[in-house]
């Protein structure tokens, strides 16, 4: 879907009241001017989930979940912004103009259809006599015929040209088949050959359930490689796919956590044996893009990686990436030589469920692992342990989680909490609480937060005057968006929570004046910047050019005086 005009988003927001939307999912109770409920995004006993009918925002004062109607639906149904927009537009009776097909859409649609035809071909081949060996393999793993349909499993016949001929008969070109890795090129300009031959075929879906790639598992012991996967192409970016995302997201909401595994066979077995919340990173190291998708689904994540040394190292790397999106996972410790697929088949669902329930906090587990290698009673060994632990914790800078872990580190090593903070943050930067309060108290933070709460204010917002490094970094993320809802969707959960919380604490009757006050200050900053530029330009010039610059400088100085006092708003 292409970019949607801001007036379409505004019309959707005008027609759908956030209280009515949230009430479709939660029993809201009035609390003064707002409404409250138990938060659907974390476990709590006292309601901290607040909905403001005046500001049309929701905010949980427990877990920080926040946003407008679009963010609420995205979280509740684990969908993307475009998907939420389409659903809300349909509910509001707002038509989203389709316009003409965007450049590149035609090519993409052809490749989606190519993958569908290939998937159907492979699936029919699985059910045919030549597919017997593939059927025996999946049956031996406890994957019955109903699952063949669910996961669209298939078989790639042992033919160098059959798939090519089938797709060609459907109107696809060799260039298209080559571009997605279904064919390989031969030397000498001969016809390209089919790459997937005599393999069990696992279709890989995007977040909407469209096949965009394939994984092919060898059926003979001497076949190389054991796993052959599609290369990256227009529809498929391996580091952005979680398998099977479209199947797992409802289960994640129902079960309250993501079970993260390594390979697609692990994920399939988990789904068939009581863990439909399982997602696989396709056998590669977890990427920041995948971590962000996981975090949008749930802040509770359990890592169930292979039980060997390589699996444990992969779990630590995944944890480090998840730290960067504010998620501290727990880790399942499988026995050496086992993976979730083999463990579930050999030991059963109940035993695996016990391991998941007892999954350890990854930081505490890592500390204990290192303690088995370094004696904390020995100064040099203790220093090595401390260096490795602090390096592991570094991506958690600025989070409350870091504070609690540093308390644990301090108790084990005898190093003061302030000393540990200095080591993590650098000289003098360990006072996280004061930094956070300074950000919260910044007029620039308030100015940005208010602008994001109102399309009219967003249109006049002067982001170019921002000087606070943190607020400016937020502006850099959102400045290209025409609508505040789109802008909010570009921020991560913690950043959005910080801004929405700022707006929620302001009485409605004071909001208009407060934005006007901040905007006057921004205008003054812009004028002062222009005045400084003119003053610099006047140096070294003379004659008419200097007179022109001077006249403009005097005009701007008069305008600055007209904006009133600079300290129009300060927080304490």
Image (tube, rainbow, N blue to C red):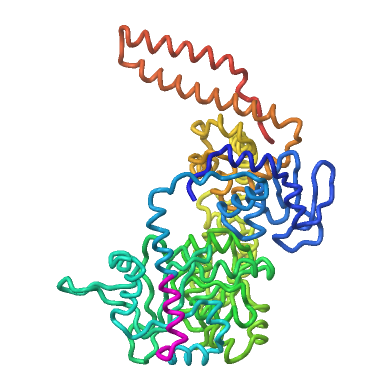
Q: Give the quarter of the figure containing the C terminus.
A: top right
Q: Which residues are magenta?
A: 117-131
Residue at the (53%, 57%) spot, across then down: 424
217, above or below 469, in the image = below
> Is 93 in front, or is 256?
93
Residue 145: x, y in percent? 55, 86
Quadrant of the image occupied by residue 165: bottom left
**Image check: 541 left or right of 473?**
left
Residue 144: x, y in percent? 56, 87
Residue that protrudes farthest toward the front in the picture: 169
529, above or below 364, in the image = above
186, above or below 465, in the image = below
Residue 136: x, y in percent? 48, 92
Residue 367 visible in the picture: no
Quadrant of the image occupied by residue 16: top right
Residue at the (27%, 76%) spot, across then down: 193
Residue 127 falls within the magenta-colored stretch: yes
Residue at the (52%, 66%) spot, across then down: 209
């Amino acid at each position: 879907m292409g970019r949607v005009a801001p007036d379409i988003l505004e019309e959707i927001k005008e027609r759908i009241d956030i209280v009515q939307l949230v009430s479709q999912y939660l029993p809201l109770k009035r609390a003064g001017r707002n409404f409250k409920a138990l938060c659907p995004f974390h476990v709590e006993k006292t309601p901290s989930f607040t909905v403001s009918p005046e500001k049309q925002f929701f905010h949980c004062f427990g877990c920080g979940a926040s946003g407008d109607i679009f963010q609420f639906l995205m979280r509740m149904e684990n969908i993307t912004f475009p998907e939420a927009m389409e659903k809300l537009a349909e509910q509001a009776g707002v038509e989203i103009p389709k316009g003409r097909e965007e450049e590149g859409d035609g090519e993409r649609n052809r490749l989606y259809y190519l993958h569908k035809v290939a998937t159907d071909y492979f699936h029919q081949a699985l059910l045919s006599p030549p597919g017997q060996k593939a059927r025996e393999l999946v049956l031996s793993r406890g994957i019955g015929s109903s699952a063949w349909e669910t996961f669209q499993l298939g078989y790639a016949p042992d033919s160098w040209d059959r798939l090519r001929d089938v797709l060609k008969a459907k109107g696809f070109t060799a260039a298209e088949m080559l571009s997605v890795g279904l064919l390989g090129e031969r030397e000498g300009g001969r016809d390209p050959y089919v790459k997937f031959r005599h393999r069990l075929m696992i279709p890989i879906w995007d977040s909407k359930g469209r096949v965009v790639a394939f994984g092919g598992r060898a059926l003979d012991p001497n076949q190389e490689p054991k796993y052959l996967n599609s290369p990256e192409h227009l529809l498929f970016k391996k580091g952005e796919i979680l398998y099977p995302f479209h199947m797992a997201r409802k289960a994640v909401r129902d079960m309250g956590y993501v079970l993260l595994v390594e390979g697609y066979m692990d994920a399939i077995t988990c789904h068939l044996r009581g863990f439909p919340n399982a997602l696989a990173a396709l056998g590669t190291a977890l990427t920041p893009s995948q971590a962000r998708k996981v975090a949008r689904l749930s802040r509770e994540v359990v890592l169930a990686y292979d039980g060997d040394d390589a699996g444990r190292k992969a779990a630590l790397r995944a944890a480090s990436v998840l730290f960067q999106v504010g998620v501290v996972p727990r880790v399942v410790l499988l026995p050496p030589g086992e993976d979730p697929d083999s463990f579930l088949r050999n030991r059963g669902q109940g035993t695996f469920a016990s391991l998941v329930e007892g999954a350890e906090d990854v930081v505490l587990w890592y500390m204990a692992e290192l303690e088995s290698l370094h004696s904390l009673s020995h100064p040099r060994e203790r220093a090595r342990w401390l260096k490795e632990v602090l390096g592991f914790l570094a991506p958690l800078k600025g989070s409350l989680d870091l504070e609690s872990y540093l308390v644990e580190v301090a108790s084990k090593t005898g190093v003061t909490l302030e000393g540990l903070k200095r080591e993590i943050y650098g000289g003098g930067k360990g006072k996280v609480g004061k930094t956070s309060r300074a950000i919260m108290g910044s007029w620039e933070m308030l100015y940005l937060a208010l602008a994001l709460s109102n399309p009219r204010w967003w249109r006049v917002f002067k982001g170019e005057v921002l000087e606070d490094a943190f607020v400016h970094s937020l502006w850099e993320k959102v400045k290209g968006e025409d609508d505040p809802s789109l802008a909010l969707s570009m921020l991560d959960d913690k950043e959005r929570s910080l801004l929405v919380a700022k707006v929620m604490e302001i009485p409605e009757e004071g909001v208009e004046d407060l934005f006007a006050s901040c905007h006057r200050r921004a205008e003054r900053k812009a004028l002062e910047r222009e005045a400084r530029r003119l003053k610099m330009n006047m140096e070294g010039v003379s004659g008419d050019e200097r007179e022109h610059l001077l006249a403009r400088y005097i005009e701007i100085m008069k305008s600055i005086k007209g904006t009133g006092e600079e300290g129009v708003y300060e927080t304490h």
